[in-house]
Amino acid sequence: MIQRLHVDKRLSDVAVHGGTVYLAGQLAEDTTQNIEGQMRETLGHVDRLLAEAGSDKSKILSVQIYLADIRDFDAMNLVWDEWVPAGDAPPRATVQALLTRPEILVEVVVTAAV
């Protein structure tokens, strides 16, 4: 059985199947913020969605981070390092990508265990 949360016409924010939680790419809603602000807000969305699915950041299996500008890597990592649980840092990839709108600085995709 597949459970989907926050489903609209185009996508679901969350799908849960076989003990695994899959999050759609998460973005900051307040795109007037700098990279640190957008990353904090985005990780807040990740926390909230994982909790709704019965998981949390200590159970993350994999993360993909898309940065509009790779020069934001160090500033993004400052926020990441504050957020990720000590001893539970998941496998992660970070790449520069052309995101859907120029004001979006970061998008985060997460897969986690329930």
Image (cartoon, rainbow, N blue to C red):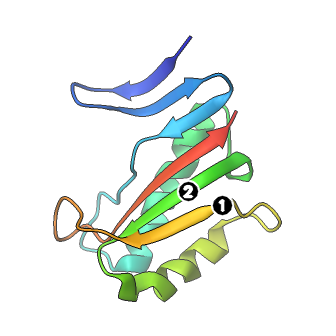
- The residue lying toward the viewer, choosing from 94 and 106, is 94
Q: Quadrant of residue 66?
A: bottom left
- The residue lying toward the viewer, choosing from 39 and 67, is 67
**Secondary element at tag 2:** strand
Specify few, some or many for label 2: CA neighbours under 10 Å numbering under 14, 14-19, or 20 or more. Answer: some
- Quadrant containing the N terminus in the rendered view: top right
- The residue lying toward the viewer, choosing from 61 and 75, is 61
Amino acid type for the residue under numbered disc 2: Val
Q: Quadrant of residue 86?
A: bottom right
- Residue 51, image x and y in percent? 62, 39
Side of 3 where 71 appears, left or right: left
Identify residue for label 2: 63
**Above-or-below relation of 98 to 6:** below
**Residue 91 - label:** 1
**Residue 33 - label:** none
The residue located at (64%, 42%) in the rendering is: 112
- Quadrant containing the C terminus in the rendered view: top right
Badge 1 vs badge 2, beta-carbon distance below 8 Å? yes
- Residue 42, image x and y in percent? 44, 59
The residue located at (38%, 78%) in the rendering is: 35
Amino acid type for the residue under numbered disc 1: Pro
Side of 114 where 63 appears, left or right: left
Specify few, some or many for label 1: CA neighbours under 10 Å numbering under 14, 14-19, or 20 or more. Answer: few
